[in-house]
Amino acid sequence: MSTTKANREKKQQQNDGRLAKASASLQQIADSNITPRNIRKIVKDSIIALQDPKVSLAVRAANAISMLDEVAQDPNMSSFARVILWSAVSDLESIRE
């Protein structure tokens, strides 16, 4: 196996791990009863966007970040949820192909 193929597989594993971590964090916000309904809907939509196999991983991450940026500014979001959201966005920003 060539080193470039090994590097590609390693990068893919890292990206998959980051995606899983971000998705789990976002699911925590979506499942929270203290999160306002409009925020939960956008967070759930971003989770669905992250799971779309027809789009490359980097594009899925960028689309989800775009959705979540708007929500992060919502004054109705609890500080607890905002910190989790920022953490998930940070994980998604580190996904590269």
Image (cartoon, rainbow, N blue to C red):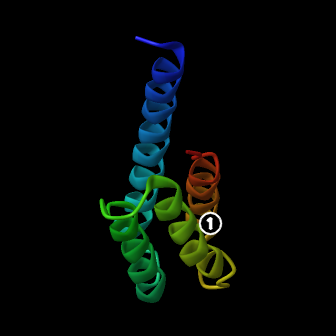
Residue occupying the point 41% across, 78% down: 40
The residue closer to the viewer here, 7 or 67, is 7
Q: Quadrant of the N terminus?
A: top left
Q: Residue 7 location in percent, x, y?
A: 53, 22
User: Could you say which quadrant of the image residue 62 lies in?
Assistant: bottom right
Residue 33 visible in the snapshot? no
Residue occupying the point 44% across, 73% down: 43
The crowd level at tag 1 (other Cα within 10 Å; few <14, some 14-19, many 20+) is: some
Residue occupying the point 31% across, 64% down: 54
Residue occupying the point 43% across, 57% down: 56
Drawn side of residue 79 relative to residue 8, left or right = right
Q: In the displayed orientation, state which residue is furthest to the front.
A: 2
Q: Residue 16 location in percent, x, y?
A: 41, 40
Q: Is residue 17 above or below residue 49?
A: above
Residue pointed to by mark 1: 82
Residue 55 visible in the snapshot? yes
User: Helix or strand or loop: what does disc 1 sit on?
Assistant: helix
The residue closer to the viewer here, 50 or 28, is 50
Q: Amino acid at mark 1?
A: Arg
Q: Residue 93 location in percent, x, y?
A: 64, 53
Q: Quadrant of the C terminus?
A: top right
Q: Residue 53 location in percent, x, y?
A: 30, 59
Q: In the displayed orientation, state which residue is furthest to the bottom.
A: 38
Drawn side of residue 8 relative to residue 55, left or right = right
Q: In the displayed orientation, state which residue is furthest to the top.
A: 1
